[in-house]
Image (tube, rainbow, N blue to C red):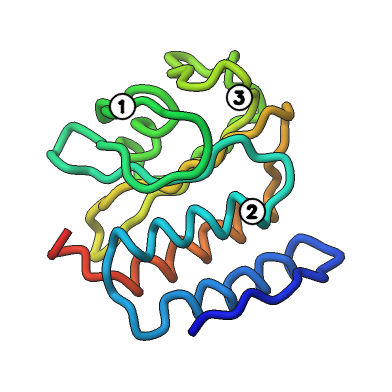
Amino acid sequence: MFQAAPLTATDKPSLYRDLASMLGGLLDGERDLIANTANMSALLFTSLPDLNWAGFYFLRTEDQLVLGPFQGNPACVRIARGRGVCGTAVAEQRTQRVPDVHAFPGHIACDAASRSELVVPLIKDGRVLGVIDLDSPVPDRFDADDQAGVEALAALIVAGCDWDRS
């Protein structure tokens, strides 16, 4: 059974190592996509400061993301490939770190309070499966340490789930 440990890290790389360890505990013995991504959303939302949304979008067709497990206000249900920050991450198959969402062309404002965003694509065998999306009401909330940390967590969730049975 998973036991949450208090986060005591004083720097972001250590914080993300602690989160990776906790995520590993959550994934241990469980491969269900919905269960694992729901727990990861809760872990990120409750552990990272200054977030107003943390969750997943899954690529359900070649051109459309569909909302998955999340924490925060209700969100947009469907996002087209190439549209907004999430759709751009899918189209470009690379992380999008946006310091000011109001300056991002075509930004989709699911929550008007969001000011910055970090979207990491979930990629397995060269195929995009979806994205992890983190929003913050603080401008320029995410830095290179956040990007590297969430990308490492993304690799864990990709490896820890049965994606073909979703």
Residue bearing the label numbered 2: 46
Q: Mark 3: which amino acid?
A: Ser
Number of numbered markers: 3
**Label 3: element kind:** loop
In this picture, residue 130 sits left or right of residue 150 = left
Is there a contact, CB below 8 Å, between mark 1 and mark 3?
no
Circle nearer the N terminus (1, 3): 1
Q: What is the x, y in percent for residue 118?
A: 55, 40
Q: Mark 2: which amino acid?
A: Thr
Q: Nearer the viewer, residue 130 or 40?
A: 40
- Label 3 crowd bin: few (<14), some (14–19), many (20+), radius 10 Å: many
Q: Which quadrant of the figure has residue 148? A: bottom right
Residue bearing the label numbered 3: 114
In this picture, residue 108 sits left or right of residue 82 = right
Q: Which quadrant of the figure has residue 79? A: top left
**Label 2: element kind:** helix
- Quarter of the image with the C terminus is bottom left
In 3D space, how far apart are the residues under numbered discs 1 and 2 (Cα atoms)? 29 Å
Residue bearing the label numbered 1: 82
Circle nearer the N terminus (2, 3): 2
